[in-house]
Image (cartoon, helix red, strand yellow):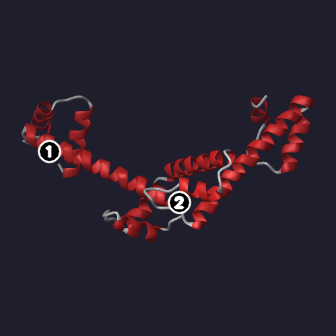
Amino acid sequence: MDRETLRELVVDYREKGYTFSKIAEILRERYGIVKDRQSIHGIYKRAVKSNDEKKELLVNIVNLYVLGYKKAEIRNILLGMDIKTSYYTIRSILEENTEYIREVQLRYIYSIATSISDGKSLEEIKESIVYKDIPPTEKGFKKLLAEAYTLIVKEACIKEIAKVYRDTEDQELVEHVIVGLGIKGVTIKDIKARL
């Protein structure tokens, strides 16, 4: 059995509630691997630490990417944080985690939209979305700001369209208004939910 498989087995058994002694016994009986309780504990501890480091790397890369940094810039920033990784690893993480990237983008977008609604200045907003004392790039900030304003305007449009529906109760008229405004992704169901 290779090291990675052994590590995953140990973590899996531990997460199921087995003691390190019981895991050692299972490995000996089922796989012919002789390890004592202490070595199983060491394997588990290193595996958990490795998983934490992978998660931290993912979070760092995605946040920097969302703030507008390119892959090579991310690598240099991480090196400055004493985190060594390759350009290939950064690219792979970004390609494999598109849902998480969108989740982080939306977190920043909602934060910016709230700050806009609270009347904060652009400089205050920009300062509020730094990550580990690293500010967004101008391009990254503008992209997030544009999406936040789009969200605000779309919500305002939906509220007004809801008034049209409330006043007329004419679903066809409301659909024409939605099409006329060119708002994508808004349905009558969304409008009715605002009533």
Task: Name the disc covering residue 67, or none.
Answer: 2
Compared with 139, 154 (above or below) is above
Q: As rendered, which of 91 and 72 lies closer to the eye?
A: 72
Front one among 36 and 193: 193
Measured as percent of width and height from the top left, residue 83 is found at 32, 62
Residue drawn 62% across the image and 56% down it: 144
Mark 1 surroundings: few (<14), some (14-19) or many (≥20) residues within 10 A: few
* Numbered circle sitting on residue 68: none
Q: Position of residue 98 (x, y in %)?
A: 51, 53
The quarter holding residue 61 reads: bottom left
Q: Is residue 1 left or right of residue 165?
A: left
Q: Is residue 103 visible?
A: yes
Q: Is residue 29 left or right of residue 12?
A: left
Looking at the image, residue 83 lies above or below residue 181: below
In the image, what residue type sits under mark 1? Gly
Work out whether 88 lies above or below 48: below
Task: Label 1: state its secondary structure.
Answer: helix
Residue 124, given in percent of the width and then of the height, sits at 59, 55
Question: What's the residue type where badge 2 is placed?
Answer: Leu
State the residue position of label 1. 42
Quadrant for the C terminus, please.
Answer: top right
Is residue 86 found left or right of 69 in the rendered image?
Answer: left
Q: Residue at x 54, y 57 (%)?
A: 127
Task: Say how many tags the image has.
Answer: 2
Residue 6 visible to the viewer: no
Give x and y (percent) for residue 12. 26, 37
